[in-house]
Amino acid sequence: MRSFLVLAATIGVIAFNWLAATGRLGNDTAAISDKYPTLMTPAGYAFSIWGLIYVGMIVFSIYQLLASNLARFRAVRSFYIFSCALNCAWLYFWHRDQIAVCFVIILALAATLFLISNHLKDPESLSDTWAAKEPFGLYFGWVTAAAIVNFAVMLKFLHIDFSPGAEDLFAVALVVLAATIAIVVRYKLTTYLFPMAVAWALTAIAVKQSGHTMIVTAAAFGVIACLIAAISFVMNLRSSLNP
C-alpha cells in the first residue's frame, strides 16, 4: 500500500508545483524572490534543474513498485512521502511570504533527503544507483544549495543588513560552505550528482552576481572543486565495474 502512496505523493508534489508555477497559489514564486534580492540569488535558469529532479522522482516511484523492490525500499518510503509534503509546504508558505517558516521547512526537507540518501548509499545493483541513489543525490544537492540561498533571503526578510563589503564577504562564506558540504557529502554518501547539483547552483549564482568579482571567483573555485569531486567518483565507479 505504501509503495502506491509513494507514486501518489510524487504525482501530488508535481501537480502542486505546477499550481505554483502557474500562479494558482496566489503569488508568483519568482516575484517573491525578487522582493528580497541577495548576493546569493542565482540566475533564473538554475531552477530548470527541477525538471531533472521530477524525472528522478518519477523513475524512483515506478522502480520501487517492482515486485523485486517492494521489500528493499520499505525503509525509505515514509521519509519520501514526508519529503513530498515538505516540498508542498515550502511552496505554500513561500507564496504567502513566510520566508522564515520556509527556511525551517527547507532544513527539514534537506534532513529528510539526507536520511533517504544515507539509506541508499550502498546500492545493490547499477539499476539501484540510477533509479534510486543518484536521483536523490541530485535532489538533496539542489535542496542543500537552495537552503543556503533561503538563509540569505531570510536575513533580508528579517531586515538584517550588511555593509556592501561585508555582504560580499558573507556571500563568499556561504559559497565556500556550499562547496564544502558538497565535497563532504560526496565522500560520505558516495554520490556524484550531489556535487553536480551544487556546482549548477554556484554557476547560476556567479552568472547572476557577475558584477561582484569576489563572489564570482569563489563560485568558480567552488564549481571546480565540486566537479573534481564528481569526476573522481565516476572514475572510481568505472574502476569498480572494470576490475
Image (cartoon, helix red, strand yellow):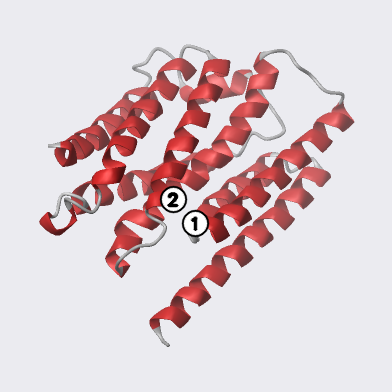
Pick the front one: 125 or 238 = 125
- Say which amino acid is labelled 2: Asn
Residue 175 placement: quadrant: top right
Residue that mark 1 sits on: 189
Pick the front one: 208 or 61 = 61
Can residue 199 be seen?
no
Q: Is 53 drawn above or below residue 165 in the view shown?
A: below
What residue appears at the point 61 percent right and 18 percent down from the top-left corner? 35
How would you rate the neighbour count of disc 2 (Cα within 10 Å): few for under 14, some for 14-19, many for 20 or more?
some
Q: Is 40 drawn above or below residue 190 in the view shown?
A: above
Sequence-first tag of 1 and 2: 2
Q: Is residue 190 left or right of residue 88?
A: right
Residue 69, percent from left and from top: 18, 55
Residue 62, percent from left and from top: 19, 49
Q: Is 49 drawn above or below residue 122 in the view shown?
A: above
Residue that mark 2 sits on: 118
Q: Is residue 124 left or right of residue 38?
A: left
What residue appears at the point 65 percent right and 15 percent down from the top-left corner? 157
Label 1 close to label 2 by CB (< 8 Å)? yes
- Quarter of the figure that contains the C terminus: bottom left
- Say which amino acid is labelled 1: Leu
Q: Secondary structure at mark 1?
A: helix
